Image (spheres, rainbow, N blue to C red):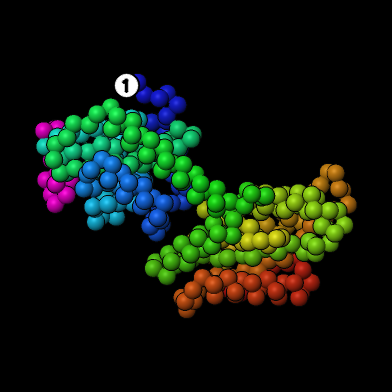
Amino acid sequence: MLLNRSIHLEDEQGRLSALHRYEVLDTAPESEFDNIIHLVTSIFKVPMAAITLIDGTRQWFKATEGLSVTETPRSIAFCDRTIRSGDVLAVEDARRDHRFSGSEFVTGDVGLQCYLGAPLTTPDGYNIGSICVIGTEPRRFSLADHELLKSFARLVVSQMELRLIAKLDSLTGVLSRRGFEEAVLESFTLFQKEGTPAWMAIVDLDRFKLINDTHGHPVGDKVLRNVALAAAQSLRRTDVIGRLGGEEFGILLRGAQIADAWSIAERIRTAIETIQFDDHSELSVTASIGLASCKPDYSHPEIWYSIADGALYKAKLRGRNQTVSRG
């Protein structure tokens, strides 16, 4: 079967960017994906199935049935072969297939003898992982089996797209409050486990109600979109921005030291202050920013948020249009 020419099989950097865009690696189990795998095992009548994502050096399992592993090296993953082939990969008797006969999945406890995998292809043409079924006896897979598994692969990608949309704010295009809170939780957990530093900035527009009252809500919406864009352009590639509600935004500075955090916060504040509105030349916008680092004695991300919010409150009391840090 000819490969789909729109699939980018040689662009590994682009493929990794497409994978990371979904922000699904190392996330908790989700019923939407678990239900798909349960249905797949039932329909194909196999003891094992999985949704896998292929990172730079590992295969990570988003959902499994009949398998106890959570990840494996990419180098031994059947699913890595699947994403490189660009089409469904069928292994009907792994013991007689020279590509796989020596695999620990075949010779070890898993006892894999047959495998069918379909790549998870993003709308922009990158194979980021696979949905696969695994059996412990040789099996001949029909063309109908191939097409059915490809349909489930499309369903998984659609679910990932829906998951991503749910994380985005429809007005500004930055993360929604839910998406931002998930990113904060991930950074909080990483800090607790490995000590990776992180800072949170709460950005609140000054006297935004007056803008809405004076110019109307359509202008207010334009202000919010421009502020989100200006703030996003002031961030590093590893940073995250989300809209927390109304005129309030959250910024997550991952891996930042105190000097970096302060510099980025001030860069954001200045960028907002210098926004120009061509059709409303009299309009100006400023923001107050509360900045706080993650601390070892915080038992929950909400404490971190409350510290940053307290710093924001001080910035408002001190006259607005400034950054206050509680490091």
Q: Check disc 1 and give the amino acid type.
A: Met
Q: Quarter-wise, where is residue 193 in the image?
A: bottom left
The residue range painted magenta reads 96-111
- Residue ID at (29%, 37%): 117
x 33%, y 36%: residue:
149
Q: Is residue 307 left or right of residue 313?
A: left
Q: Is residue 262 magenta?
A: no
* Residue 222 appearing in the image: yes
- Mark 1 secondary-structure assignment: loop
- Tell me: 39 left or right of 17: left
154 to 159, vertically: above or below: above
- Residue drawn where x is 55% and y is 48% of the image: 165
Residue placed at 45% from the left, 26% from the top? 6
| The stretch drawn in magenta includes residue 107 | yes
Please state which of residues 33 and 291 is positioned toward the viewer in this rendering: 33
What residue would you read off at disc 1?
1
Q: Position of residue 224 (x, y in %)?
A: 72, 53
Front residue of 226/30: it is 30
Picture quadrant where residue 122 is located? top left
Magenta segment, principal secondary structure? loop
Visible residue check, residue 275:
no
Tag 1: Cα neighbours inside 10 Å, few (<14), some, or many (≥20)?
Answer: few
Q: Is residue 172 above or below residue 254?
A: above
Residue 261 at x, y percent in the picture: 59, 63
Vertical arrangement, residue 317 with respect to residue 106, above or below: below
Q: Quadrant of the N terminus?
A: top left
Residue 190's x, y, as percent? 43, 64
Using the image as rendered, state which of residue 53 and residue 148 is in the foreground: 148
Residue 151: x percent and y percent?
38, 35
